[in-house]
Image (spheres, helix red, strand yellow):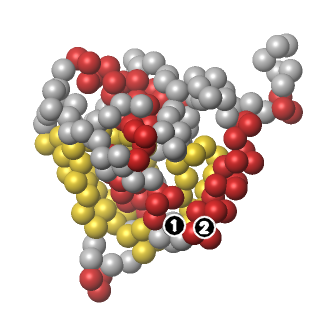
Amino acid sequence: MPTLPTDGTVLPITRWGEPVMHQLCKPVTTFDDQLKKLVADMVATMNAAEGVGLAANQVGVDLQLFVFDCPDADGVRHQGVVCNPTVEVVEGKDRKLDEGDEGCLSLPGAFTKCARPDWARVTGVDENGEPVTFEGNGLLARCLQHETDHTQGTVFGDRLSRKYRKRLFAEAEELAPHYPADWPVSPIYDPENELTDAE
């Protein structure tokens, strides 16, 4: 399993509604130290937000790139870096949908059911330009599809019916006061623990 970098800086997460979240991102063409720093910062940000994946446009960078650290249906942990991803899912009579809950760090705190194929394979290259392939089921399959969607300017709300989308946004709006504008640089605001940091 590839080892993700541990020397990154936590960045603010870009929210749905910002243009970079809703447009096709640019392919990665330069594999240099700047890209490696971005990857390290993305990993630090994903970990600070307690997420299982994060795409570059979620930190405001217009590139087809994501990082992930996510278990599959058997609890086996997978992690990696994917630039210029292409996703493959099962089609036809063998296709099975997972109706599980889905959330997004760019719409923090809100979850709703989103049907996706229960297996996925992603191919691309890593931060060094070397070919990579990741595949699996369960949450990993959902993560690989969700993050590849981000690189194409698609958020999972785009895949929901109007009813579920409305419910998702209502939940996000209710939770919004808990998430500072620069989250996860600043932690989630919990009024019940308001005095904890000051003590």
Q: In this view, does 71 lie to the left or right of 81?
A: right
Residue drawn at x 21%, y 44% as measured from the top left: 84
Q: Name the residue under label 1.
A: 160
Q: What element carries label 1?
A: loop
Q: Where is residue 62 in the image (x, y as percent from the top left)?
A: 32, 34
In the rendered view, tell whether residue 100 sits above or below residue 145: below
* Of 54 and 20, the residue lying toward us: 20
Disc 1 crowd rating (10 Å Cα; few below 14, some 14-19, many 20+) is: some
Q: Which amino acid, by three-letter code, is at mark 1?
A: Leu
Q: Which residue lies furthest to the bottom in this view?
A: 93
Q: Give the quadrant of residue 168.
A: bottom right
- Image quarter (top left, top right, bottom left or bottom right) of the C terminus: top right
Q: Position of residue 141 (x, y in %)?
A: 38, 59
Q: Which residue lies furthest to the top in this view?
A: 199
Residue drawn at x 47%, y 70% as measured from the top left: 115
Mark 1 vs 2: CB contact within 8 A: yes
